[in-house]
Amino acid sequence: MRNYLQLIGIALQNQLPPDFQSAFLFAEVDDGFTSLGVYFSSSPHRVVFRYAKRPLDDLVYRFWKNGQDRILPRSWATIEYMIVGTKLDVAFTYSGDFDIHEAPWVRDERVLARRFPGYVIDRSSPDARSEPVA
């Protein structure tokens, strides 16, 4: 069985600049649908937003569709995947706990305020290339 959590972490890091201090992936997934945001911080109190690249989007969808270990296929609605230094924190919102009446942008802002309290979110260049240069 594929280790999706590890593969997602690698794909996420491949999308970040080499000097990132923390990285956060927030994704909502449903049948035939994904909405992913990649956030990273390289300086105090500023978080940069980027659209997720294709490999990361595909891995998150396959993880949702196939499951892994004790995480049942198609059981969760959102994933919060955070890397700070060498620490990893993964949290799920499961379908039964998901507020379908909450607007996606409201949910995003609530999650970001909890994960990055007091930080300014820079959404000025969501398509900018932030991968490390080989």
Image: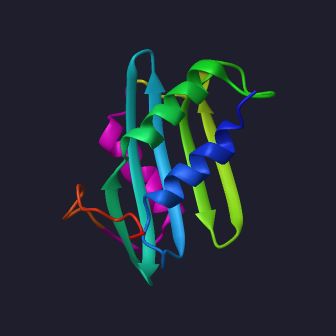
Coordinates of residue 89 in the picture (x, y in percent): 68, 55
Q: Closer to the camera, 111 or 76?
A: 76
Coordinates of residue 42 in the picture (x, y in percent): 44, 79
Quadrant where the C terminus lies? bottom left
Give the side of residue 62 with respect to residue 17, left or right.
right
Q: Residue at x 80, y 27 (%)?
A: 70
Give the side of residue 15 with respect to residue 49, left or right.
right
> Which residue is most to the bottom?
44
Q: Residue at x 50, y 28 (%)?
A: 61
Q: Residue at x 45, y 61 (%)?
A: 113
> Which residue is most to the front?
134
Q: Quadrant of residue 74?
A: top right
Q: Residue 118, relative to residue 81: is it above or below?
A: below
Q: Closer to the camera, 3 or 95?
A: 3
Q: Closer to the camera, 117 or 25?
A: 25
Quadrant where the N terminus lies? top right
Q: Quadrant of residue 63?
A: top right
Q: In this orientation, does residue 74 appear?
A: no
> Which residue is most to the right?
70
Coordinates of residue 29 in the picture (x, y in percent): 46, 27
Q: Residue at x 44, y 64 (%)?
A: 16
Residue 115 is a magenta residue: yes
> Which residue is most to the left?
124
Q: Residue 67, relative to residue 20: is it above or below?
A: above
Q: Closer to the camera, 114 or 18?
A: 18
Coordinates of residue 35 in the picture (x, y in percent): 37, 35
Give the side of residue 123 with respect to residue 5, left or right.
left
Task: Identify the magenta region.
Answer: 101-121
Q: Residue 63, relative to residue 5: is it above or below?
A: above
